[in-house]
Image (spheres, rainbow, N blue to C red):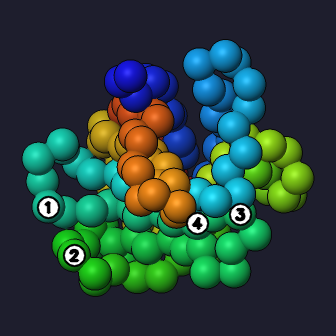
Amino acid sequence: MPAGEYNILVDRGSTFKFHLTFYNSTETAVDLETYSSSMQVRKSYTTDNILLSITGSTGDSNKGVVGGGSTGYFTGTGGVAGVGGIELNSSKAGVVGTTGGIFVSVDHTTMQNIPSGRHFYDIELTNLSDNNVTRILQGRFEVEPEVTR
């Protein structure tokens, strides 16, 4: 089954928070206890330059955010650590306990370094018991410029 499509509009320099719920084919929320997740934002589908990389799992103290810092992008394992990450089985407030909930957050400093304009993202889930990867969501990640800095 192809990934769902959803376009995200964000303000440059504002804290980013995004929540969705992952359901199976019978419309039952999937328990994500044995999963990890990752999300990347890039200027295009084909570039090696990453604007934003976000990771995490359920109750994960190692969840993380990496942005491009003053250059706006990085490649490979470079980049500048930010604050936030992905919390699985989470509520809209980022509190663990909601089956199927996926809560993504990125601090305002990291978001300030993402260039304004149209970019692209996707979110993947990895089942840690069999390493099966499923791309669940994709779309445009549009960043509106800010005036107040």
Q: Are marks 4 and 3 in contact (CB under 8 Å)?
A: no
Question: If the image is split into quadrants, where does the N terminus sit?
Answer: top left
Mark toward the start of the polypeptide (4 vs 2): 4
- In three-dimensional space, the C-alpha distance between marks 1 and 2, rounded to whole angstroms, equals 8 Å
The residue tagged 2 is 76
The residue tagged 3 is 58
Q: Which residue is at 58% across, 57% downward?
A: 35
- In three-dimensional space, the C-alpha distance between marks 4 and 2, rounded to whole angstroms, equals 18 Å
Q: Which residue is at 54% across, 45% downward?
A: 11
The residue tagged 4 is 56
Mark toward the start of the polypeptide (1 vs 4): 1
SS under mark 4: strand
**Hey, what amino acid is under mark 2?**
Gly
**Hey, what amino acid is under mark 1?**
Asp
Relative image position of residue 32 (x, y in whole percent): 67, 50
Relative image position of residue 100 (x, y in whole percent): 72, 41
Relative image position of residue 46 (x, y in whole percent): 11, 47
Residue 92, visible in the rendered structure: no
Question: On screen, 63 above or below 131?
Answer: below
SS under mark 1: loop
Mark toward the start of the polypeptide (1 vs 3): 1
Mark toward the start of the polypeptide (1 vs 2): 1
- In three-dimensional space, the C-alpha distance between marks 1 and 3, rounded to whole angstroms, equals 28 Å
Mark 1 or 3, closer to the camera:
3
Quarter of the figure with residue 137:
top left
Question: On screen, 35 above or below 65?
Answer: above
Q: Which mark is residue 48?
A: 1
Badge 3 crowding class, 10 Å Cα cut-off, few under 14, some 14 to 19, many 20 or more, is: many
Mark 4 or 2, closer to the camera:
4
